[in-house]
Amino acid sequence: MKPMIRLFSIAILLMVFSSPSYSQRRNASEVEIKTSAQCPMCKESIERTLTFERGVRHALLDMETKKVTVRYNSRRTDPDKLRKAITRLGYDADNKEGDPEAYAELPGCCKKPDDPDHFSH
């Protein structure tokens, strides 16, 4: 009976350590990225876009600090790719400027406060 228990234990260990959830937790990383977000529309847009990026598990933008915290799988993406996703929307991401064409298309409430086209809600 003892060999059967050992075999069963090995099978359980193999299932646990080869499961996607275990490997995802093992490769889990988190990064905070400073953005130029101005309003709830910015928050929604940035969070939604990051959520659809490959490897991202969770994105949450704090409007007081304007920092987005992103949990992601480090085997599938990295902070530079996440910053690039934000800049493609027209927002700044840390030291990277937002795409000028995308920025021009943002609503006035999403533009930077020093922009003449900016307005508050």
Image (cartoon, rainbow, N blue to C red):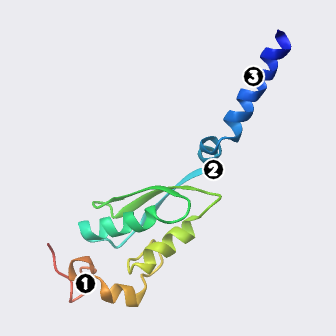
Residue type (three-letter) at the residue carrying disc 1: Asp
Which residue is disc 3 drawn over?
A: 9
Q: Quadrant of residue 36?
A: bottom left
Query: From what the image shows, is residue 10 above or below residue 113?
Result: above
Distance, label 3 to label 2, CA atoms, is: 25 Å
Distance, label 1 to label 2, CA atoms, is: 40 Å
Residue type (three-letter) at the residue carrying disc 3: Ser
Give 8 or 65, whichever is nearer the viewer.
Answer: 8
Which one is earlier in the sequence, the residue at label 1 or at label 2? Answer: 2
Which secondary structure, mark 2?
loop
Give 53 or 35, whichever is nearer the viewer.
Answer: 53
Which one is earlier in the sequence, the residue at label 3 or at label 2? Answer: 3
Which secondary structure, mark 1?
loop
Which one is earlier in the sequence, the residue at label 1 or at label 3? Answer: 3
Which residue is disc 1 drawn over?
A: 114
Query: From what the image shows, is residue 57 above or below residue 47?
Result: above
Which secondary structure, mark 3?
helix
Q: Which of the two marks, 3 or 2, is nearer to us in this view?
A: 3
Q: What mark, if any, has residue 27 been given in the picture?
A: 2
Q: Tell me what residue is drawn at x 38 percent, y 70 percent.
A: 35
